[in-house]
Amino acid sequence: MKEQEYKIDNQKTFELKDIFECGQCFRWNEQEDGSYTGVVKDGVINVRKQGETIIFTGMCKKDLKEIVENYFDLNRNYEEIKTQLSKVDNYLKNSIEYGKGIRILNQDLWETIISFIISANNNIPRIKGIIERLSQKYGDEIKWNENKYYTFPTVEQLENVTVEEYRKLGLGFRDIRLYETTHKILEKQIDLEVLKTNPNTIEVREELLKLSGVGPKVADCILLFSELKRFDTFPIDVWVRRVMNDLYIKENDESKVSKKKIEDLAEEKFGSLKGLAQQYLFYWRREN
């Protein structure tokens, strides 16, 4: 484990607030200087912007440049994607302008599964608190800059955790779901390595839905926000339903708009990039 620094210049699509506050991640926290610090796998990384330069510093086992390029999806041309999606209509063009710095992170699949199970019927401060307590109790400690950080616990580290112990962390009804999902993965009823190599999004989604606490919306979030990186998914929550109805469907009662109607419309308008379109629309609608 060593302290490292890596800088990139002229990366147009990279705004800290857009990336870390758009609802895709829960382990990044804003610092007093406007930078963000987060735990990525077995390391701690701080990200700050100085003009057009993005500066990453961290305490990591592996090469920081390699970690950052993969995690922040730096080899993908988001400018090209934004140009393509901006042609769909002015609604999407405006939402892209608002969230122009969004990048979809390549988050660890196991961590993303558990994090989004915890996110069900929950708010972001509570989700972050539960994940932090889970990591403090069962993850590994990292000391950096006189602070203590904790890695997200591996599936093996949660092997002997009981439902009651989960409950003490404030998980509520999600306690049994974490327990059951952990054991399904430990027993290879669902093989995460197989999911990573399966190119068929529908098949991977069906496997994820077998996990306790993973419904359609959580499955779509896992597909989009993890290292599975499936832009052809369209997670639908209250904000997405609202924005799709307000802009396109225009029913008097948005709660009556079917999930299928929204999915069909998203496929028709946004195609294979509908996951990214969803994120721009979601972020714009929620923040405004």
Image (tube, rainbow, N blue to C red):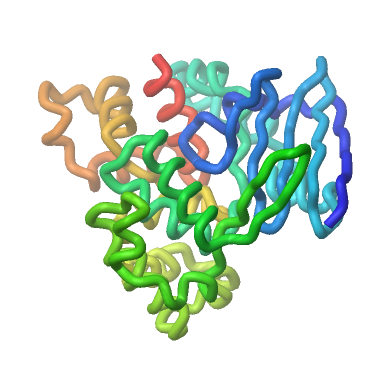
Give left or right: position of 231 versus 11.
Answer: left
Q: Quadrant of residue 11?
A: top right
Give left or right: position of 153 versus 186.
Answer: right
Q: How many marks?
A: 0
In front of the other: 272 or 253: 253
In front of the other: 27 or 158: 158
Q: Quadrant of residue 34?
A: top right
Q: Residue furthest front?
A: 146
Residue 143's spot in the image, x, y percent?
73, 48
- Residue drawn at point x = 50 percent, y = 16 percent: 94
Up-down relation of residue 288 to residue 160 (above or below): above
Residue 41's spot in the image, x, y percent?
66, 57
- Residue drawn at point x = 81 percent, y = 18 percent: 50
- Residue drawn at point x = 15 percent, y = 25 percent: 251
Residue 220's spot in the image, x, y percent?
40, 52
Quarter in which the N terminus is drawn: bottom right
Give left or right: position of 227 versus 33.
Answer: left
In front of the other: 127 or 8: 127
In front of the other: 266 or 32: 32
Up-down relation of residue 212 to residue 247 (above or below): below
- Residue drawn at point x = 75 percent, y = 26 percent: 48
Residue 282's spot in the image, x, y percent?
41, 29
Quarter in which the C terminus is drawn: top left
